[in-house]
């Protein structure tokens, strides 16, 4: 399949039990973004609680998306644009608070970097704040203190039977206005009607004009089932419940055994390695990186050759109007880097090690230069690329050698 969008649940999927992204998984996700695949973090976490992961995965530089609050918001990177949002009517908050008090359940919601709650000392709430890098603020009257429309509210109890009983009651009582569901044995979540990961993801796919066949979704929980079923390839984690696995097209390894990396390597990296490289996606992704700032555009890519163009303009010329040597080397590294990415096996990664250039002639402002990269050495631990750079009249102006080191993921 030609994957354009990779949708990842976070806890129990992207993160291991230590709440970390493993090096192998991080490498695989960085690599597919370099090859034009966009990542969506689809989580019940608040938007604020996902921002550190966005930066760690460089999604802010590669046009990724946050799908937070189980679908309550969509944020587009890198400009932090709010694309979609649905919130709870504040007029319903007094009723929710009253039922929480009657049952003895702490209630809380999110606002920016803060959790607002009637029970700031509750261990589950404090753990939720720690997990998302947020602070906790206690309030005496929940409905009175919430002067905004929350994306979701949550109730907490160690009494699973009592939570289940209230959930069943609210599914009948709140039908048509709010949805409720259990995200953990101890959490009961209240969200706007029709909000779940699949519904919001469908909205995003329509906006991006991406078909389900070009989407891979990976998750481990009941809240992930709808998006797993909707995606062209639905993947369940090895640590998922049996009911989740039954809904998936493919079951990968657990979150403790790099399950996300295994799925990405098998179904995305191996497919890209043997098929046409999506240049339109790469050019769109690169507009926020150095190549975009210099106006570099890929024009051809295969295992044998990579080509790209770059304008000689105010971004790439020297003060006296000829092409800057540093811009030439950046162009050479860009095409050689993509070439090694294509040649790498799914369990390998590329790191640029050395570049040397011979500048033979000049190109002047207003021209567009063309780089042609060919591999002259394909070793197990290194690739060497020769990159010739020509003017629009095919005059050779630079010849560059680029050494890339090839390493196995760990």
Image: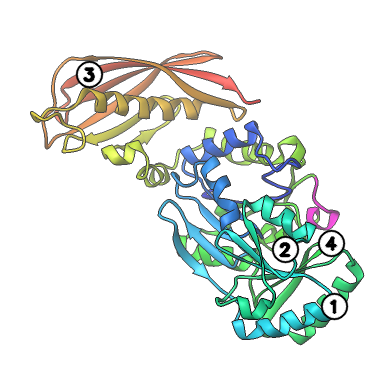
Between 76 and 154, which is closer to the camera in this rendering?
A: 154
Q: Give the labeled residue for mark 2.
A: 120
Q: CA distance from mark 1 to mark 2?
A: 17 Å
- Residue shown at 52%/13% (left/top)? 379
User: Residue 332: horizontal and vertical position, in percent?
Assistant: 32, 24
Between 28 and 205, which is closer to the camera in this rendering?
A: 28
Q: Which mark is residue 185?
A: 4
Q: Give the labeled residue for mark 3.
A: 398
User: Residue 8: horizontal and vertical position, in percent?
Assistant: 63, 50
Residue 344 appears in view: no
Single out the mark in the foreground, 1 or 2: 2
Q: Secondary structure at mark 4?
A: loop
Q: CA distance from mark 4 to mark 1?
A: 16 Å
Residue 213 appears in view: yes
Between 403 and 175, which is closer to the camera in this rendering?
A: 175
Residue 240 colored in magenta in the image: yes
Single out the mark in the foreground, 3 or 1: 1
Up the image or down, 218 lies above or below 382; here it is: below
């Amino acid at each position: 399949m030609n994957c354009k969008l990779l949708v990842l649940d976070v806890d129990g999927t992207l993160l291991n039990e230590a709440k970390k992204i493993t090096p192998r998984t991080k490498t695989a996700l960085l690599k597919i973004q370099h090859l034009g695949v966009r990542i969506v973090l689809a989580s019940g976490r608040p938007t604020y609680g996902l921002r550190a992961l966005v930066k760690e995965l460089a999604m802010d530089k590669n046009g990724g998306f946050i799908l937070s609050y189980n679908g309550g918001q969509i944020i587009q990177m890198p400009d932090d644009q709010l694309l979609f949002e649905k919130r709870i009517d504040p007029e319903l908050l007094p009723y929710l608070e009253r039922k929480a008090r009657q049952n003895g359940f702490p209630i809380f919601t999110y606002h920016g970097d803060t959790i607002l709650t009637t029970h700031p000392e509750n261990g589950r709430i404090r753990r939720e704040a720690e997990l998302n890098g947020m602070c906790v603020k206690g309030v005496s009257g929940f409905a009175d203190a919430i002067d905004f429309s929350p994306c979701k509210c949550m109730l907490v109890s160690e009494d699973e039977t009592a939570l289940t009983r209230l959930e069943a009651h609210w599914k009948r009582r709140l039908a048509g206005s709010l949805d409720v569901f259990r995200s953990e044995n101890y959490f009961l979540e209240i969200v706007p009607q029709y909000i779940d990961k699949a519904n919001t993801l469908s909205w995003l796919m329509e906006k991006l004009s991406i078909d389900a066949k070009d989407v891979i979704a990976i998750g481990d929980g009941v809240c992930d089932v709808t998006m797993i079923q909707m995606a062209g390839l639905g993947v369940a984690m090895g640590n998922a419940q049996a009911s989740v696995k039954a809904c998936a097209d493919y079951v990968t390894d657990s979150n403790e055994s790099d399950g996300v990396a295994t799925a990405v390597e098998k179904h995305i990296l191996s497919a890209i390695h043997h098929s046409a490289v999506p240049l339109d996606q790469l050019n769109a992704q690169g507009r926020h990186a150095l190549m975009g700032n210099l106006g570099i555009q890929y024009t051809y890519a295969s295992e044998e050759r990579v080509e790209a163009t770059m304008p000689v303009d105010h971004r790439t010329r020297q003060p006296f109007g000829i092409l800057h040597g540093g811009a030439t080397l950046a162009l050479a590294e860009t095409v050689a880097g993509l070439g090694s990415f294509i040649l790498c096996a799914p369990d390998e990664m590329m790191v640029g090690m050395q570049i040397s250039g011979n500048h033979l002639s000049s190109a002047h402002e207003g021209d567009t230069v063309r780089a042609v990269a060919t591999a002259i050495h394909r070793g197990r631990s290194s690739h060497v690329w020769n990159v010739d750079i020509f003017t629009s009249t095919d005059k050779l102006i630079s010849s560059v050698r680029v050494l890339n080191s090839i390493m196995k993921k760990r």
